[in-house]
Image: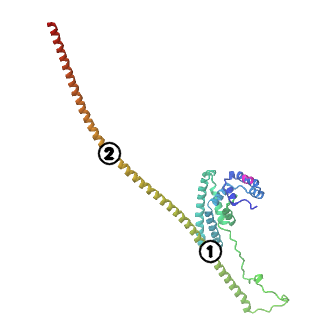
Amino acid sequence: MPGPSTELVQQLYRTPPDRFVAARDAAVADARRAGDPSTARQLARLRRPTVAAWLVNLLAIRRPELVADLVELADELRTAQRELRGPRLRELSAQRRAVVGALVAEVRKLAAAEPDAPPAGRLPLAEVEATLNAAFSDAEVAEQVRAGRLLRAASYAGFGEVPRPQLRLVTGDDEEPAEEDRPARRPGAQRARPEPATRTDRAAPGTDRAASRKDRAAGRAEQAERAAQRAARAERARQRRALERELALAQADQKRVEAELTEATGQERDGVGVLDGIEAELAELERRRAVAEQDLSRAKLARRAAERAVTVARRRAGEVEGAIEALAAEEGDADGGAGAAD
């Protein structure tokens, strides 16, 4: 059986510590139900990380490119420490402080995005910073950080990698050649008594040793130069990757704002068209209002004329009715007088 997948292990190690055991046991149960006891045993051996280690693992899993930069800078810093290159060491130390500060800030942002993470005030950021600094000094810690499977925070009290130079005390006595450089002794050579060496013969080994020391010094200088060249290439490569990432982000931002500009331009054009339409409608409504006001004025004049005509007609009708009544009264009086005469 191949064992648990990298994705499953990363999923477990980016799970908050208070839920790690439950998630791991569920993965073990799934492996057993799938008939994979080997994977189940390997999963069961995974241990819960501390909160600080979980935060470092979260950084390695979510932002592996940042951790890769840290590991690369740590290699350069340890190389400069071993070779005792002061100016380069000071430059890399300044970069280390900047990188660690940026990574701690990134850890804070990643934790804020996790729903089950502790509150910001309870995050062990000091332990996270100590672990990242330890990664600069210890290659094994750096590898654990890069793998995203750290179980507990690490710390380092010193600075840089502990140098282990291979030194030997040099005295005024002649150096003894290395075992492999000694000439093979012939049988009976121990019994043969060497002839007294002349001053020239005694001086020759010292000259050879001086030349050998010069050769070794030249070789160390050449190695240091090659290491410096490798470090410079690595630094340029790191800077190139950083610039390429910045360029990709800048290009993405450019595309985004250009799309927003295109959308805003279209919305502006649509708004101008709508406004023009509304203004045309308003002009038409104003025209219709003016016509309606004129019609209303004419209607009012016509109503007033009609009212006056009605008043005149009513008065005339009343006058006619009065005249009719008067005529009827006269006729009645006339008829009464005629009957009396009869």
**Can you say whether 168 is above or below 67 in the image?**
below
- Depth order, front residue of 307/73: 307
Spatial CA span between label 2 and label 1: 82 Å
Quick check: 244 left or right of 278? right
Image location (x, y in percent) of residue 247:
53, 65
- Magenta stretch containing residue 303, yes or no? no
**Residue bounds of the magenta highlight:** 25-29
Image location (x, y in percent) of residue 311:
23, 27
Quadrant where the N terminus lies? Answer: bottom right
Q: Amino acid at mark 1?
A: Arg
- Depth order, front residue of 234/124: 234
- Depth order, front residue of 200/79: 79
Image location (x, y in percent) of residue 164:
70, 71
Picture residue at 26% right of the left edge, 33% below the top = 303
Q: Amino acid at mark 2?
A: Glu
Picture residue at 59% right of the left edge, 72% below the top = 88
Q: How many marks?
A: 2
Picture residue at 64% right of the left edge, 55% below the top = 124
Asked if one can make out residue 75 in the rendered structure from this viewpoint, the answer is yes
Q: Look at mark 2 in the image and give the residue it sits on.
A: 286
Comes first in the chain, label 2 or label 1: 1
Quadrant where the C terminus lies? Answer: top left
